[in-house]
């Protein structure tokens, strides 16, 4: 565990939902070295689950087949985190980049995670790749939760 962010992220996710969300986080972090593909898949699942919980709590409906970018966009709009909801350039830029990170967590899971079959010569992520994706997902999830809790 080389990341100093693991403990605060873990505490925030456990406080939010110890039964599902924190369990998914533990699965993701425990797999970074031994099962990088599984860790990447769990990282995406973490973000999808947090988005769905927040949308459910805000009584926002979403399609059953909504993918991670769609779920994030809905949750971001509900929490005033969508780039187009801001005038300040720096906030627009940061929130746009946050949205890109979330989108790429979904993309990397599709390409390098263990949720899809692969051909004979698959690209395999290394533990450092999984650690990056898991930590990004954890940071994005805790940011979403903190914003949800801090709404007026």
Image (tube, rainbow, N blue to C red):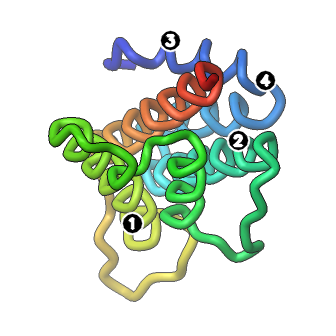
Q: Residue furthest left?
A: 89
**For the residue carrying disc 1, how many other residues have a C-alpha within 10 Å: few (<14), some (14-19), or many (20+)?**
many
Q: Is residue 20 above or below residue 75?
A: above
Q: Residue furthest bottom?
A: 119
How far is disc 3 from disc 1 in space, using C-alphas?
Answer: 26 Å
Q: Are marks 3 and 1 in contact (CB under 8 Å)?
A: no
| Left-right relation of 114 to 60 | left
How far is disc 1 from disc 2 in space, using C-alphas?
Answer: 27 Å
Place residue 32 in its image quadrant.
top left
Which of pointers 2 and 4 indicates the residue nearer the eye? 2
Q: Are marks 2 and 4 in contact (CB under 8 Å)?
A: no
Q: Which residue is mark 3?
A: 7
**Depth check: 107 or 58 in front?**
58
Q: Is residue 136 above or below residue 8?
A: below
How far is disc 2 from disc 4 in space, using C-alphas?
Answer: 15 Å
- In the picture, which quadrant includes the N terminus? top left
Point out which mark residue 54 bears.
2
How far is disc 4 from disc 1 in space, using C-alphas?
Answer: 28 Å
Q: Residue 136 in the image: state x and y as whole percent.
A: 37, 38
Q: Which residue is mark 1?
A: 112
Q: Which residue is mark 4?
A: 18
How far is disc 3 from disc 2 in space, using C-alphas?
Answer: 22 Å
Q: Residue 29 in the image: state x and y as whole percent.
A: 52, 32
Looking at marks 3 and 2 on the same chain, the residue that comes earlier in the sequence is marked by 3
**Label 1 secondary element:** helix
Looking at marks 1 and 2 on the same chain, the residue that comes earlier in the sequence is marked by 2
Q: Is residue 135 above or below residue 81?
A: above
| Left-right relation of 45 to 80 | right
């Amino acid at each position: 565990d080389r990341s100093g962010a693991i403990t605060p992220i873990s505490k925030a996710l456990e406080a939010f939902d110890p039964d599902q969300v924190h369990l998914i986080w533990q699965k993701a972090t425990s797999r970074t070295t031994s099962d990088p593909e599984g860790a990447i898949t769990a990282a995406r699942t973490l973000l999808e689950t947090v988005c769905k919980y927040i949308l459910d709590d805000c009584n926002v409906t979403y399609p059953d087949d909504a993918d991670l970018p769609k779920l994030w966009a809905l949750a971001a709009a509900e929490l005033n985190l969508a780039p187009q909801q801001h005038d300040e350039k720096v906030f627009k830029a940061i929130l746009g980049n946050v949205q890109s990170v979330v989108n790429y967590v979904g993309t990397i899971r599709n390409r390098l995670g263990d949720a899809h079959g692969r051909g004979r010569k698959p690209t395999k992520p290394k533990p450092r790749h999984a650690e990056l994706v898991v930590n990004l997902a954890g940071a994005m999830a805790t940011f979403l939760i903190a914003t949800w809790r801090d709404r007026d």
